[in-house]
Amino acid sequence: MFTACFSTGYNPSTMSRRSPFTIRISALLGIAGLGMGLLTYPSTIGASDNLHIEITSKGLGKEVVITQGTREWFMLIEVTPENSVVLRQEKEHDTYLVDESETHDRPMTAGEVDAAITDYVNSVKTRATKE
């Protein structure tokens, strides 16, 4: 003869083999991980005249992509222990108007990278509003 007893209610402790402490820690770590993911999401800076500016960290350097309609401006600063490379591109549709790079014989500091990105963004804003 076979006999079974079934619970009529839902009890989380019978459904999970994890302790309540482990569940709380897992939830906190999940929330912290989500927060870190949001912090590393590329930042978007609002600008006038429908300029969309996106700045992303790339290792020790940074990348900025600015778009306005069919125009796109791009700057990448790549920093290695030996040198720094700065790449600038500007295109309209699929035609490159500017495609230049420069190499510095030393690594740029974080402050120099930030200043170069800020100067580039400001110069694009100025040129875009004049056109």
Image (cartoon, rainbow, N blue to C red):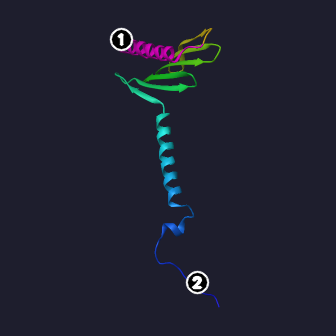
User: Tag 1: Cα neighbours inside 10 Å, few (<14), some, or many (≥20)?
Assistant: few
In the rendered image, residue 58 lying in the magenta stretch gets the answer: no
Q: Secondary structure at mark 2?
A: loop
Give the number of callouts: 2
Amino acid type at circle 2 is Ala
- Extent of the magenta region: 107-131
Q: Main secondary structure of the magenta part?
A: helix
Amino acid type at circle 1 is Lys
Is 80 positioned to the left or the right of 8 in the image?
right
Q: Which label is found at residue 130?
A: 1
Answer yes or no: is residue 62 visible. Answer: yes
Frontmost residue, 109 versus 78: 109
Q: Which callout, 1 or 2, points at the residue further toward the start of the chain?
A: 2
Q: Position of residue 123 (x, y in %)?
A: 42, 12
Distance of mark 1 from mark 2, alpha carbons?
81 Å
> Which residue in the protein does label 2 denote?
4
Q: Secondary structure at mark 1?
A: helix
Residue at the extreme front: 21
Q: Residue at x 59, y 18 (%)?
A: 79
Where the N terminus falls, by quadrant? bottom right
Q: Position of residue 108 (x, y in %)?
A: 56, 13
Where the C terminus falls, by quadrant? top left
Q: Position of residue 110 (x, y in %)?
A: 51, 18
Frontmost residue, 75 versus 32: 32
Q: Position of residue 50 (x, y in %)?
A: 37, 24
User: Tag 2: Cα neighbours inside 10 Å, few (<14), some, or many (≥20)?
Assistant: few
Contact (Cβ within 8 Å) of mark 1 with mark 2:
no
Frontmost residue, 52 versus 94: 52
Q: Is residue 26 above or below residue 36?
A: below
